Image (spheres, rainbow, N blue to C red):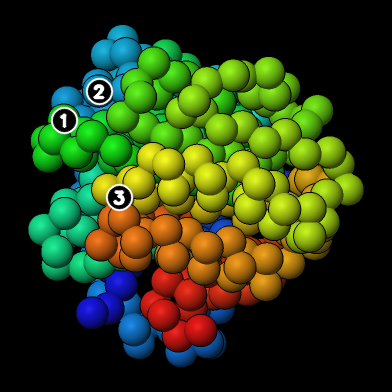
Amino acid sequence: MPIAYLHHNDCLLHDMGFGHPERPARISAIEDQLRASQLLDFVRYYDAPLATRRQLARVHHLKYIDQVLEFSKKEGHAYLDPDTIITPQTPTAALRAAGAVVQAAELVIASKHQMAFCNIRPPGHHALPNRAMGFCFFNNIAVGVAHVLEEYGLTRIAILDFDVHHGNGTEEMFRDDPRVLLCSTFQHPFYPHCGAGVISDHIINVPLPAGTTGDKFREAVILHWLPALHKFSPQMIFISAGFDAHDDDDISQFHLHANDYAWVTKEILLVADKYANGRIISVLEGGYDLHALGRSVAAHLKVLMRMV
Ligand SMILES: [Zn+2]
């Protein structure tokens, strides 16, 4: 069964300006690397639909959703935070990004695909219920998870976040929902400067210091994520797949490599096979060095495609 690959060219229209690391070229760099690695032959391509207001409203405030959507009728740009710039093209890109995860979830629930990868931007895991933050507008993965919880009645969903930044938005949305196990590793102290002190049996935050290598990352996953996952026995797994902890990515001070992403993906796959009928939905978050991003996503997908 091929993996579902969700994307839309509207995701390329959102442009926060010259020199901004979260840029349209990220999406093309991934697709170019997948093509060069001949991995695109093993995916089924889907054009991501627009998320609906109702789907977004499960995790975002209506007033905030409308504030973002209204920008499509405006001109110029505005700063929603010091790093997060909205333009008239942003709402459509953000709706496609969230819509991709909803459709991925439906394809996997319907057993049309066992797994899906959403090559989308803007990313989502910093987006809060009522505001944009850290390059994120709508919390794509949270919109998809909330859709599955509400429409299909699943009661145990795991979100695994290996982006180098803490997914504070996702945590805020599911902090009081024990149906969701959120496991995260992130650089700390670092943006967004939270997550280290959270104590909860369904929020497994593992702050790691600047300089963290692949060995220390793997140790954190083995010691903290895997026991929690085996205890929780998820019915479905979503991955906040950020690749900005890569050694070549200047945005962080972590030193992961493509083989570390392959390793963690394999560990996730083993859990998914044991408890979740192999159901995994991977959603792009960060990753700003174009070559490292392309190579890391290729390594990640090769494992999901069961080629290694
Ligand atoms: Zn990040």
Q: Secondary structure at mark 2?
A: loop
- Residue 198 in sight in this render: yes
Q: At label 1, which amino acid type do we have?
A: Glu
Query: Could you give the CA–CA distance between mark 3 and mark 1, rounded to whole angstroms?
Result: 14 Å
In the rendered picture of this protein, how many numbered marks are placed on residues? 3
Residue mark closest to the camera, 1 vs 2: 1
Q: Residues within 10 Å of mark 3 (few under 14, many from 20)?
A: many
Q: Is mark 3 within 8 Å of ligand 1?
A: no
Residue 202 locus on image (x, y percent): 46, 28
Q: Which residue is mark 3?
A: 236
Q: Quadrant location of residue 166? A: top right
Q: Which numbered marker is on residue 221?
A: none
Q: Which mark is residue 58?
A: 2
Q: Which residue is mark 1?
A: 150
Judge from the rendering whether residue 31 lies leftward or rightward of residue 233; answer left or right: right
Q: Nearer the viewer, mark 2 or mark 3?
A: 3
Q: In the rendered view, would you say 258 is above or below 169? A: below
The residue that appears at 23% across and 50% down in the rendered structure is: 105
Q: Position of residue 280 (x, y in %)?
A: 35, 58
Mark 2 vs 3: CB contact within 8 A: no
**Kind of residue sitting beneath label 3:** Met
| Residue 68 visible within the image | no
Label 1 Cα neighbours within 10 Å, binned few <14 / some 14-19 / many ≥20:
few
User: Which residue occupies the foreground of this view, 72 or 250?
Assistant: 250
Horizontal side of 212 relative to 49 (left or right) equals right
Q: Which of these two is toward me, 18 or 114?
A: 114
